[in-house]
Image (spheres, grey):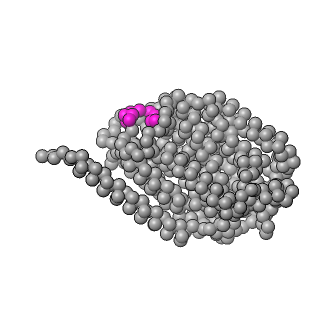
C-alpha cells in the first residue's frame, strides 16, 4: 500500500535534494578547477593585449590601428574597423579592468546561449533547471575552445551570442529584427558572414536583407568615422596573410589545416578547394532540411560547424562553435525512448566528442604530424566537426522555418516538464523540439604548446 506524502515530507524531500545538488555542483566545480590548473594553458590574455595595445596606440599615441604590432611579435589588429569602434571604450580602461570586462562578458553570454540550448532538455526530462545550467557551465569551463577563448581574451563567444539571438530567438519568433545579430557579427569579424549565406540558402529572405543591411550600414558608419583605418583595412591589412600565422600549425583545425599538414612546404590549394566545395554542398543540403523541419537550432549548429571547416584558419579557440552541436546531441539523445540504442548512441557520441575536446589531444602531434597516426591524431577536432556536420540529427515533425511560435521563457526555478506535450514541435524557448509519438515515460611561425597563437 502506498502512503501519500504530506506537505512537510514533500518540502523536506525537495530541501534534501537541493542540498545534494548544491554539494554536487561544488564538488564538480572543485574537480574542474583542479583539471584547469593541470591542463589549461595560460596565455596571459595575449589576444586581448593585442587589441588593447592597438587601441591605445590609435587613440592615445596618434598612430594608425593597423600599423600596430605587439612588441616582439608579428601580431596586430586584424578585425574590420567596426570592431575597433565597438572595442573603442577599452582604450579608456586600465589593463586589469579590460580583463575583467572581457572575462565577464564571455562568461555571461556563454551562460545565456547554453541556457537557451539546454533548458528545453531540462524541462522535457524533468531535471532541476538551475542545477542543469550549473553543471553545464562547469563542464563548459573545461571545454578547451572555451577555456582558450577566455585565456586569450578572444571575442568568439560574443559573436556566437549575436548569431544565436537571431537563429534561436528572433527568427523562430518571426521577428522583423531577425538578421541584426548576424549583421553585427559579420561587421565585427568577417567569418560569421557565412550565416548570412545560411539565411539565403534557407530562403529567409527578409532576415538575409536585414543582416546585409546591418553589416553594410555598420561598415559604412565605421568608414565615415575612420576613413584612414577603413582604407588601410580593406586595401592592405585584410590581405596580409603574414599577420595570421602558419596554416600547418596544429592549432589550425580546419580543412585547410589538414591539407597543409599533409605537405607543409607545398600544400595543395586544389585539394583544399575540392574539399571545401564538397563540404559546402553537404552543409547546404542539411541546413535546408533543418529549415524545412523548422529546426533553427540544428541549422545554427551546422553552420557554426561548417564555418570552422571551410575557414582557411580555425584556431582551437574558434571551435566554441562546436558547442551547440554537442548540446544538441544530448538534446536528441534525451528525446529518444529510454534504453533505446538511439539514446545510447547519441549520448555516447556527445560524451566522446566532449572528452576529446577537453583533452588537448591534437597537441601531441605539434612537433610532427607525419604518418598515419599524425594524420588521424593531429586532425582530431576536424574529424569531430565533420561527424557533427554529417550525423547531427535534425528534429523532424517541426513547423515551416520562421513560423515556430515562441514566447517568454518560464521561470528558471521550475523543475517540471515543459507545458507542451511530447508531440509539440516547438517549445516556449523558441528552440524546435523533436516530435516523439513513440516515447514512453519522460526521460608562417611555429609556436610552442602554451605559446602565443595568432590573433583572430
Quarter occupied by residue 425: top left
What percent of the width, then of the height, locates residue 357? 54, 59
Q: Is residue 106 left or right of residue 237?
A: left
Is residue 328 highlighted in magenta? no
Q: Is residue 258 left or right of residue 26?
A: right
Can you say whether 253 is above or below 293 in the image? below
Can you say whether 34 is above or below 379 in the image? below
Closest to the observer, 219 or 370 = 219
Residue occupying the point 85% across, 59% down = 61
Q: Residue furthest left?
A: 1
Can you say whether 421 is above or below 80 in the image? above
Query: Which range of residues does the magenta coloring cover?
Result: 419-428
Residue occupying the point 73% across, 52% down = 89
> What secondary structure prevails in the magenta region?
loop
Q: Is residue 453 visible?
A: no
Closest to the observer, 201 or 237 = 237
What percent of the width, then of the height, locates residue 413? 41, 46
Closest to the observer, 82 or 251 = 82
Is residue 421 highlighted in magenta? yes
Amino acid at each position: 500500500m502506498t502512503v501519500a506524502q504530506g506537505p512537510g515530507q514533500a518540502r523536506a524531500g525537495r530541501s534534501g535534494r537541493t542540498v545534494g545538488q548544491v554539494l554536487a555542483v561544488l564538488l564538480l566545480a572543485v574537480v574542474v578547477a583542479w583539471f584547469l590548473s593541470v591542463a589549461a594553458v595560460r596565455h596571459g590574455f595575449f589576444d586581448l593585449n593585442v587589441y588593447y595595445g592597438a587601441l591605445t596606440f590609435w587613440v592615445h599615441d596618434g598612430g594608425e590601428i593597423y600599423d600596430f604590432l605587439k612588441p616582439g611579435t608579428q601580431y596586430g589588429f586584424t578585425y574590420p574597423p567596426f570592431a575597433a569602434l565597438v572595442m573603442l571604450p577599452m582604450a579608456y580602461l586600465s589593463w586589469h579592468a579590460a580583463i575583467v570586462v572581457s572575462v565577464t562578458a564571455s562568461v555571461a553570454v556563454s551562460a545565456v546561449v547554453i541556457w537557451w540550448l539546454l533548458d528545453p532538455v531540462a524541462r522535457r526530462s524533468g531535471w532541476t533547471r538551475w542545477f542543469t545550467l550549473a553543471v553545464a557551465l562547469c563542464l563548459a569551463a573545461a571545454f578547451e575552445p572555451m577555456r582558450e577563448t577566455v585565456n586569450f581574451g578572444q571575442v568568439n563567444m560574443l559573436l556566437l551570442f549575436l548569431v544565436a539571438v537571431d537563429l534561436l530567438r528572433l527568427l523562430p519568433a518571426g521577428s522583423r529584427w531577425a538578421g541584426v545579430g548576424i549583421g553585427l557579427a559579420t561587421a565585427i569579424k568577417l567569418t560569421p558572414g557565412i550565416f548570412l549565406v545560411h539565411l539565403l540558402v534557407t530562403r529567409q529572405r527578409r532576415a538575409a536583407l536585414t543582416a546585409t543591411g546591418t553589416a553594410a550600414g555598420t561598415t559604412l558608419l565605421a568608414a565615415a568615422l575612420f576613413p584612414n583605418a577603413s582604407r588601410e583595412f580593406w586595401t592592405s591589412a585584410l590581405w596580409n596573410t603574414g599577420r595570421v600565422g602558419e596554416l600547418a600549425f596544429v592549432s589550425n583545425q580546419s580543412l585547410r589545416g589538414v591539407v597543409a599538414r599533409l605537405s607543409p612546404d607545398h600544400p595543395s590549394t586544389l585539394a583544399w578547394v575540392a574539399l571545401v566545395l564538397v563540404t559546402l554542398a553537404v552543409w547546404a543540403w542539411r541546413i535546408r532540411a533543418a529549415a524545412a523541419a523548422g529546426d533553427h537550432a540544428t541549422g545554427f549548429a551546422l553552420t557554426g560547424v561548417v564555418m570552422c571547416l571551410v575557414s582557411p584558419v580555425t584556431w582551437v579557440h574558434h571551435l566554441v562553435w562546436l558547442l551547440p552541436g554537442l548540446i544538441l546531441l544530448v538534446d536528441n539523445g534525451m528525446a529518444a525512448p529510454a534504453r533505446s540504442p538511439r539514446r545510447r548512441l547519441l549520448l555516447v557520441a556527445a560524451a566522446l566528442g566532449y572528452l576529446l575536446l577537453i583533452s588537448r589531444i591534437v597537441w601531441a602531434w605539434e612537433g610532427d604530424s607525419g604518418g598515419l597516426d599524425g594524420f588521424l591524431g593531429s586532425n582530431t577536432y576536424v574529424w569531430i566537426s565533420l561527424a557533427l556536420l554529417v550525423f547531427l540529427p535534425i528534429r523532424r515533425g517541426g513547423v515551416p522555418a520562421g513560423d515556430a511560435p515562441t514566447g517568454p521563457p518560464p521561470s528558471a526555478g521550475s523543475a517540471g516538464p515543459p507545458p507542451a506535450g511530447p508531440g509539440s514541435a516547438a517549445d516556449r524557448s523558441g528552440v524546435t523540439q523533436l516530435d516523439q509519438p513513440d516515447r514512453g515515460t519522460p526521460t608562417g611561425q611555429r609556436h610552442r604548446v602554451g605559446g602565443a597563437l595568432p590573433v583572430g
